[in-house]
């Protein structure tokens, strides 16, 4: 049981990875990780049995208007999302324009397209 509790995401974990609180109210306490080109990861109800992670595309003129959305992780099917799984997902997306924070160490992601 302790292993499960230790792997449950907290708001502090999300902030340490690079997620930000959004300025407007949502019922699921959403936080976002900006990916660039009007895309972002959105996580709601982190650390609860209603936890959800989406990749979204926003309208270029209004960030709050979502034009595309795909659910990447849902507690009902996948259980709790761990910090390490979330960091791996971000790395798999190939985000290289910003460093991924891992605890106190910042890891620069390689951009294979520039070589």
Image (tube, rainbow, N blue to C red):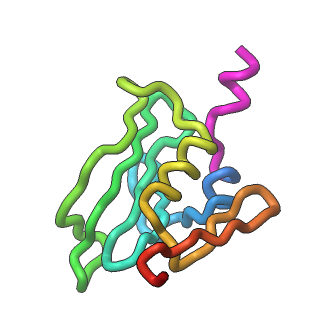
* Residue 2, image x, y percentages: 75, 19
8 displayed left or right of 55: right
Which residue shows up at 24% across the image and 82% down it? 60
Instruction: Specify the farthest residue to the front.
Output: 115
- Give the x, y percent position of residue 92: 46, 55
- The residue lying furthest to the left in this view is 67
Give the number of marks. 0
Q: Residue at x 33, y 79 (%)?
A: 37
Please say whether residue 34 is one of the residues in the magenta stretch: no
Quadrant placement of the N terminus: top right
Identify the residue at the far top of this view.
1
At x 40%, y 41%, the residue is 52
Residues rendered magenta in the picture: 1-11
- Quarter of the rendering containing residue 113: bottom left
Q: Is residue 51 above or below residue 2?
A: below
Residue shown at the point (72%, 22%) measured from the top left: 3
State the predominant SS element of the stretch in magenta: helix
Q: Relative to the observer, which residue lies in front, 19 or 62?
A: 19
| Residue 32 percent location from the top left of the image | 47, 62
Residue 35 placed where, x, y %?
Answer: 42, 70
Left or right of 5? Residue 98 is left
In terms of depth relative to the viewer, which is nearer, 57 or 113?
113
Q: Is residue 25 above or below residue 71?
A: below
């Amino acid at each position: 049981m302790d292993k499960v509790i230790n792997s449950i995401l907290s708001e502090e974990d999300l902030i340490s990875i690079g997620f930000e609180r959004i300025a407007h109210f949502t019922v699921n306490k959403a936080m976002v990780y900006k990916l660039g080109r009007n895309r972002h990861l959105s996580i709601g109800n982190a650390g609860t049995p209603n936890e959800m992670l989406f990749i979204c595309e926003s309208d270029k003129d209004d960030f709050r208007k979502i034009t595309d959305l795909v659910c990447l992780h849902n507690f009902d099917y996948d259980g709790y999302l761990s910090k390490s799984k979330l960091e791996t997902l971000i790395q798999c997306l190939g985000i290289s324009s910003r460093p991924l924070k891992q605890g106190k160490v910042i890891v620069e992601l390689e951009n294979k397209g520039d070589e």
